[in-house]
């Protein structure tokens, strides 16, 4: 005599079909969320390091420069400006108060951004007269997602809300 325990083949196939349908609906949403989170995290990291550069510049009364895509695309550094090494060499050379290299998550990059400099009074500028402030920095994931952060002359950073 058979006991009534267990599932029939039809019940298992229906359960598998339901799991497949739910996965087909849920996975694109999960992927979208992961991409947005990578852009959000990267932009917050950039903003945090810009603030740290300002604090370093004020505390040492020395200019600091934030170099984007330095030493390679998708990375950036905060460098002390001492006037002895030109900008082109600074991505590969380090001085005492330079930061490490901050890497963005994979597939996250910057839009076209010049370097950003902060002086010993905490005021920002674009070195070499490369434009006017406020400066908008775009952190982007391929062509699908991006987030802008804007840095004012006085160091206020505002983030695009999306």
Image (spheres, rainbow, N blue to C red):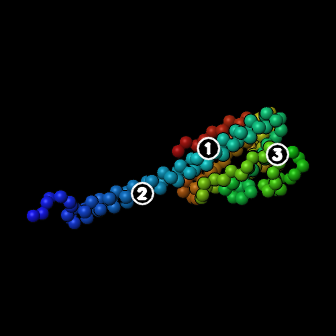
Badge 3 is on which residue?
96
Q: Is residue 24 visible?
A: yes
Q: Residue furthest right?
A: 84
The tally of labels here is 3
Image quarter hosting the N terminus:
bottom left
Q: Give me the residue at 74% from left, 57% from top.
A: 71
Q: Is residue 89 above or below residue 152?
A: below
> On the rendered structure, is 139 left or right of 130?
left
Q: Of the residues under marks 2 and 3, which one precedes in the sequence?
A: 2
In what element is the residue under mark 2? helix
Quadrant location of residue 144?
bottom right
Label 3, residues with CA under 10 Å away: few <14, some 14-19, many ≥20: few
Badge 2 is on which residue?
27
Q: Give me the residue at 83% from left, 48% from top.
A: 95
Front label number (2 vs 3) = 3
Q: Give me the residue at 58% from left, 56% from top.
A: 141
Q: Is residue 47 above or below residue 85?
A: above
Which residue occupies the foreground of this view, 135 or 93? 93
Front label number (1 vs 3) = 3
Q: Of the residues under marks 1 and 3, which one precedes in the sequence?
A: 1
Which numbered circle lies on residue 44? Answer: 1
> On the rendered structure, is 50 left or right of 62?
left
Q: CA distance from mark 1 to mark 3?
A: 25 Å
> On the rendered structure, is 149 left or right of 99?
left
């Amino acid at each position: 005599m058979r006991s009534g325990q267990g599932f029939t083949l039809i019940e298992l196939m229906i359960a598998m079909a339901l799991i497949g349908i739910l996965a087909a609906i849920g996975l694109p949403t999960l992927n979208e969320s992961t991409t947005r989170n990578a852009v959000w995290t990267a932009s917050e990291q950039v903003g945090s390091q810009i603030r740290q550069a300002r604090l370093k510049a004020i505390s040492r009364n020395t200019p600091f420069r934030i170099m984007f895509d330095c030493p390679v695309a998708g990375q950036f550094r905060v460098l002390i400006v001492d006037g002895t090494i030109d900008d082109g060499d600074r991505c590969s050379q380090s001085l005492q108060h330079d930061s490490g290299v901050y890497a963005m998550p994979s597939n996250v990059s910057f839009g076209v951004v010049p370097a950003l400099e902060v002086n010993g009074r905490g005021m920002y500028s674009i070195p070499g007269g490369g434009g006017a402030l406020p400066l908008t920095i775009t952190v982007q994931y391929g062509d699908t997602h991006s987030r802008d952060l804007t840095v004012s002359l006085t160091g206020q950073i505002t983030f695009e809300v999306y």
